[in-house]
Amino acid sequence: MNNKYFIIDFDSTFVQVEAMDELAVIALANHPDSEKVIEEIRSITNLGMEGKISLSESLNKRVQLLGANKKHIEQVITLLKTKVTQSFKRNSEFLKNHASNIYIVSSGFKECILPVVKEFGILENHVYANTFTYDENGNVNGLDTTNPLSQDKGKVSVVKNLALTGDVWAIGDGITDYEIREAGAASLFYAFTENITREAVIAKADAEIKSFDELLYIHELPRAISYPRNRIKILLLENVHPNGIKLLQDEGYTVECMKGSLGEDELCEKIKDVSILGIRSKTMVTKKVLDAAERLISIGAFCIGTNQIDLDYATKKGVCVFNAPYSNTRSVVEMVIGEIIMLMRKVVSKNTKMHKGVWDKSADNCYELRGKKLGIVGYGNIGSQLSVLAESLGMQVYYYDVIEKLQLGNAKKCDTLDELLSIADVVTLHVDGRKSNANIIGEYEFGLMKDKVIFINLSRGHVVDIDAMVKVLQSGKILGAAVDVFPYEPKNNQEEFINPLRGFDNVILSPHIGGSTEEAQLNIGEFVARRMINYVNTGDTTQSVNLPNIQLPELKQAHRLIHLHSNVPGILAQINQVLANHSANVLGQYLKTNELVGYVISDINVEYGKNVLNDLKKIPGTIRARVLY
Ligand SMILES: NC(=O)c1ccc[n+]([C@@H]2O[C@H](COP(=O)([O-])OP(=O)(O)OC[C@H]3O[C@@H](n4cnc5c(N)ncnc54)[C@H](O)[C@@H]3O)[C@@H](O)[C@H]2O)c1
Ligand SMILES: O=C(O)[C@H](O)COP(=O)(O)O
């Protein structure tokens, strides 16, 4: 590190904001035309940053408009301390340990900069910036024009004067930072874009760095995180909620979003360099897709169902899958209740008639749901919550599940599906989407149902034999039906919905919207995004649907090595042998297996060499080994 020097800009680089703009907001708070003046200051800042006006012109104009005093400067320092750029904050150890190699060179003002950077160990005599001049009342009335930084190319002359020999890297978001390199005072210029992206500046740079981690990573220097987050590419399909997107962007990941789903071939092409994939129920993640994904570590199903993912193959490839098991449960249940009432009162067919001008007032075949028998097939999260709500509306609840379930309220368990189907006035399906559930309701099962039954499916399309359902609808046996899910569903809102159930006036058809409420989508977006962030950052697999669930404690003063392997005997011993060979003291170790894989986390207290990881990867049966800190 002796001959490597970092020339770091302050505004929009070391901190997320432009200190002068923030000072203006504070100083002009009571100014009658404050918004206009602040806007003017901001536009002058940008013109200067993009090189459209000279620096001295930009500085002078702004100081004159500012109207600041010493009290305002105190306030802006307090604010700036909360606005330190995340990647500098994260790497505070590096800044402290290498203070003699780090300079802050800024066209901003030392009064505002020094108290902020000092907290990160930056040496006072390594901070170069302008200084204000004040009148006798402590009001800013100008700037020290003898300071080279108040002049054009001031940064160039400051850095030249430092006479550094070795690698000198200028890091900043503005043209004045590039000028240091242009003049030969720095060997490289890195356009820093964690806070702001200026295309004109990137165009001049040797490289763009989206974070300070990135720079440390490129040069293999000690850093807070092993792999820069901006290098982790996330692809989110099917309109994931903006809150989920924001959580992922705030972590520093590079996120690409698409409204619709992608077919297999398109997805194979797109997924090559993606580390995290976010989907909903429509995107099929097949073996072919998983094989095409060269960097995939996690899939987030921003919904309940995960049958669209080849889970076993994902597990074998070490891809950790998450879903949102409860976030839209209530939305589905409310829709089922509403549909039962609408169908029992024939509102659906009467509504169609009304729109054609037909007034059909009659009570024929219209019923209250009070006292009717509700048959729930699949007493999981949705089925059991529906049970509680339906009972509170006066229905008698019966359920059938393939496994033993806690009976809620007065609900009665049926031992067989046949028994349930022959008892229920309303049959509603809430089974999961496993393959073996294909056509569990077909001609025979419809035959068992009572005349004038209400039939509802909001679970998965393939569980009902649609041709058999059409036949039974044509026979008039079904009083009303509601179907939200279909064996084939359009990929996006532009594709036509083609299905033989179209055209029945006693059938409610809806475009797979059981879970589509604002509340559910927000909850799902945040829940799944948080689970994936936790997994990437800490290795925590809590609530993963395919990897062994390990809830991990926060890691302090240690390195975390993660090893995922096929579940064969003896791997833990081999991992520990590797760690012993490298004299790594194990502070904590966590192991869990499922029938396919084993997941071992080892927290160690020594600097790890690359060889530890390489040796861990060489253990036969290893699926994935990575280091977190
Ligand atoms: N329409 C929508 O928008 C929407 C929204 C959310 C969930 N869903 C779907 O609803 C279904 C239920 O969701 P959940 O959260 O309650 O799932 P869950 O896993 O909590 O419950 C499913 C239950 O079905 C049972 N089961 C499975 N196969 C069965 C069978 N053949 N016969 C009887 N019981 C069987 C399981 O044992 C389990 O108890 C899932 O298919 C899910 O994908 C649809
Ligand atoms: O599995 C689910 O949660 C539902 O089927 C909803 O799926 P969606 O998010 O694609 O609407």
Image: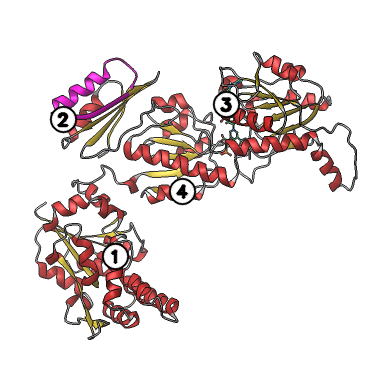
Q: Is residue 64 left or right of residue 188?
A: right
The residue tagged 2 is 584
Mark 2–mark 4 Cα distance, whole angstroms, equals: 38 Å
Q: Is residue 315 magenta?
A: no
Decide: few, some or many residues near mark 2? Use Cα within 10 Å; few <14, some 14-19, many ≥20.
some
Q: Are marks 4 and 1 in contact (CB under 8 Å)?
A: no
Residue bearing the label numbered 4: 245
User: Is residue 587 rendered magenta in the image?
Assistant: yes
Which region of the structure is painted magenta?
A: 566-591
Look at label 2 and name its amino acid.
Ala
Q: Which residue is mark 1?
A: 78
Q: Residue furthest bottom?
A: 136
**For residue 409, side relative to residue 250 (left or right):** right
Residue at 58 percent across and 35 percent down: it is 329
Q: Disc 2 or 4, which lies upstream in sequence?
A: 4
Look at the numbered discs 1 and 2 and tell me whether their residues touch, using CB distance below 8 Å.
no
